[in-house]
């Protein structure tokens, strides 16, 4: 099964993708949007993308791509994130890594390397590549990326020890299922009136369905117009979820509602 994720090899996305596919079946893309587009276009059977971090919150590029492309979520993978500082030596001027990793280690960097500049690159592995090529550059990444060419200067440099990232495995839309403990929805009401959001939430609350996440993203249609991303702790096979979905579809009759399918969660420590 061909699985595509954020590359190059050595990213945290790559490590999460190993829960879905063998290394030999994993291919790489340079962006979350590229991964989602590849799945929607049938270029790969599975994709693995980050959607939420416990420190920095949602990965908005992934959410926006789910709105733009029609795909299914078939699995949720939660993995602890343990960042390390890697460089050719302790003398460097710049720290390069993915923007999320830099943000997750912001306080540690300010305390230990206040004079170092930071640069956001496409992935943690790209930062590691920079550090391998340039002795003036350090990287933030998984400690396993150290080796003969890079020193492991510090481990567990994330600002909170509870740092974890939620990834999802995505598939073509035809593979959506109703079986699973969670369901993700995207709702575009194409309406704006007092109490609209309350009514959307009541469709779930009235049926004792816990919403584990709700987030609004600009629709791109006009200023102040939003798309809502919801995760519900219930499967689509449940009658209560089907009734909640019917109510939401009525409220969004001028817009649209998409369920990304139901799926189960697992924690992977790697």
Image (spheres, rainbow, N blue to C red):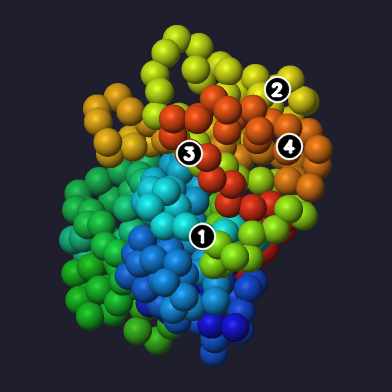
Q: CA distance from mark 1 to mark 3?
A: 15 Å
Q: Which mark is residue 241?
A: 4
Q: Is residue 15 above or below residue 115?
A: below
Question: Residue 161: horizontal and vertical position, in percent?
Answer: 57, 46
Give the mark, 4 or 2, whose residue is nearer the N terminus: 2
Residue visible at 37% across and 73% down in the picture? 29
Q: Tell me, yes or no, whether the two marked residues, 4 and 1, touch with CB atoms within 8 Å.
A: no
Left or right of 109 on screen, residue 204:
right
Q: Outermost residue toward the bottom?
A: 24
Instruction: Answer whether residue 74 is visible to the viewer in this image.
Output: yes
Question: Residue 3: horizontal and vertical position, in percent?
Answer: 53, 77
Circle 3: element type: strand
Q: Is residue 66 above or below residue 46?
A: above
Question: Residue 150: horizontal and vertical position, in percent?
Answer: 36, 78
The quadrant the N terminus occupies is bottom right
Q: Are there few (<14), some (14-19), or many (20+) residues within 10 Å of tag 2?
A: some
Dividing the picture into quadrants, the one containing residue 254 is top left
Circle 4: element type: helix
State the residue in front, 20 or 174: 174
């Amino acid at each position: 099964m061909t699985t595509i994720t954020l590359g190059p090899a050595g990213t945290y996305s790559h490590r999460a993708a190993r829960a879905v596919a063998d290394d030999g079946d994993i291919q790489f893309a340079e962006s979350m949007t590229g991964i989602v587009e590849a799945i929607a276009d049938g270029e790969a059977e599975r994709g693995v993308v980050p959607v939420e971090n416990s420190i920095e919150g949602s990965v908005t590029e992934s959410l926006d791509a789910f709105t733009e492309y029609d795909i299914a979520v078939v699995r949720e993978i939660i993995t602890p994130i343990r960042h390390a500082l890697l460089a050719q030596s302790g003398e460097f001027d710049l720290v390069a890594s993915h923007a999320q990793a830099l943000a997750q280690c912001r306080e540690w960097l300010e305390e230990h390397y206040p004079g170092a500049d930071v640069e956001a690159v496409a992935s943690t592995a790209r930062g590691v590549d920079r550090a391998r090529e340039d002795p003036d550059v350090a990287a933030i990444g998984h400690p396993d990326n150290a080796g003969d060419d890079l020193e492991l200067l510090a481990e567990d440099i994330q600002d909170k020890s509870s740092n974890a990232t939620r990834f999802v495995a995505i598939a073509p839309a035809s593979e959506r299922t109703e079986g699973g403990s969670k369901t993700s929805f995207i709702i575009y009401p194409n309406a704006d009136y007092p109490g609209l959001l309350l009514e959307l939430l009541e469709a779930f609350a009235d049926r004792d369905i816990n919403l584990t996440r709700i987030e609004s993203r600009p629709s791109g249609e006009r200023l102040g117009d939003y798309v809502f991303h919801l995760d519900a702790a219930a499967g689509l096979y449940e009658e209560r979820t089907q009734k909640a979905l019917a109510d939401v579809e009525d409220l969004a009759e001028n817009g649209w509602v998409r369920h990304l399918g139901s799926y189960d969660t697992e924690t992977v420590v790697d």
